[in-house]
Amino acid sequence: MASTWHTLPNEIKLAIVDNLDPYTARIFSKVDLQTYKVCVPSIFKSVRLGSLDQLQHFLENVPRTYYRHIQELDLCTRSGSNDEQSTSHYPRAASDAVLSILIASSRLKKLVLRMAGSLDKSIITPFAYLQELRILTIANCSEEEHSPLSERLVVSIAATTPNLEQLSLDRITRSKLHAPELEGVYPYVPLVLGDEDVPDHPVLGSELSLPSLLHIPTLKKLTIRDTHLGDSRWTTIPVACRLEVLDLGSCYRETEEYNGLCTERIMAAVGPTVDEFSLTTSVSDTVFAKPAATPLPRLRKLHISPFFPVDSVVDTMSNLAGSPIESLSMQCYEDDVVDVCSALEDFLSLRVERGPEFYNKLSRIDVSVTVNDHSTSDAEEVEERLEATKRLQEFCRDLQLSSAVGKAVPESCSFVHELSPIRPSRSNSIFLGSGDKPSVFASRRANTL
């Protein structure tokens, strides 16, 4: 069998290995050195590094020539010691490590970058050369008060990426340069100081506030969560992108009303091209209810997050009636199932009362439930939830609407958890757990491949 495998053309070998899951490819690569060489592109196609220690270990042990095979990279600059301040003591080391892997990963298509606060401005440089990078996630994995992640650094990175289509930001901190009005004012939103050294962008210049993201012409999907969105420039900056998907969270330091106003302001700015929208705050502006005037004339899919105030469902849906919404999905926690189903029934009752022109495009309503594995619900509460979902689905059937109620798919965690090295992993990536070494055939051989 070995002789049959080795007589195959390299193109056939690569095609076979490409159909193996990463775990199987790593096992198969141990057959011999020649097979290992064939498996390298598959093994290193997707890489997850859950801490700065793991990133540095990867850089020290994996041949640099292998980095060109990385297409999906998920890395975190937080120290593996769980010391909140440890990374901030060595910002240069974290910046150099990120810079080293990005410069050599020329085929990168998807990047998740979890930074423990801002890194040195030098990490901006390699993004100009990542021509294939389409999906970028940047999140602060430290406490904002101690290690803020500057909006100026993040905006510059995003704007420097030449073909960026999907951008997701989490816990980005406003810069004092762009938000001096927030300094020392309740509710005391954290501000970044000293980020004026972020160089001017060739197109944006020194205007590196969050609203400048709308200048990125290739951008199609924008997600911003746990970030202050109160910048008035969202309404004045010319929009160069054609967003199709918009997902806005809220700032927990601000009131529900203030967050709602911020959301409406951004919706009005980018709405004409948006097809899909995820809502965390209520919408009170009735201009969205008028088909001829709504800023969201193409909105077809509406998602409502579990943080949305349930008692605002009917009013918000009424205020969004000007959009041709076809699909409504609502996510909630287990304890809120009854209230959510009741609110959706109230909305459907309003739809019946208002006549056939009110949400005449609507064809589907789904509810996804985030289940608590440690729930202490008794049998009566469980039965009450089942009855509530049954009533909602029966109502939907009466109105000839499709409907489904099920468990929500959990989002990826902020940090990569350790995997046992002896347990088979079917994940789509090479993973370095604590103490693991990168998967190379033999260190004395690998450096010569």
Image: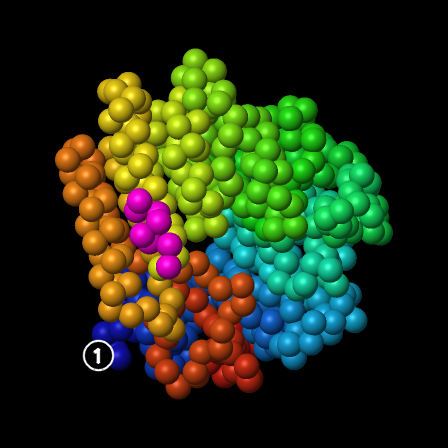
Q: Is residue 52 left or right of residue 121?
A: left
Residue under the image location 43 percent in, 13 percent down: 292
Locate residue 210: give its quadrant: top right
Q: What residue is rendered at 68% in x and 63% in y?
A: 143
Residue receiving disc 1: 1
Query: In terms of image quadrants, where is residue 148?
Result: bottom right
Q: Residues within 10 Å of mark 1 (few under 14, many from 20)?
A: few
- Which image quadrant: the N terminus? bottom left
Q: Residue at x 47, y 15 (%)?
A: 293
The percent position of residue 208, horizontal first and vertical second, equals 73, 39
Q: What's the colour scheme? A: rainbow
- Quick one: which residue is furthest to the front in this view? 380
Three-letter residue code for mark 1:
Met
From the viewer's side, name the closer residue of 261 and 226.
261
Q: What range of the chain is rendered magenta?
A: 335-342
Toward the viewer: 186 or 195?
Answer: 186
Report x, y in % for residue 85: 74, 71
Q: Is residue 279 left or right of residue 407?
A: right
SS assignment at label 1: loop
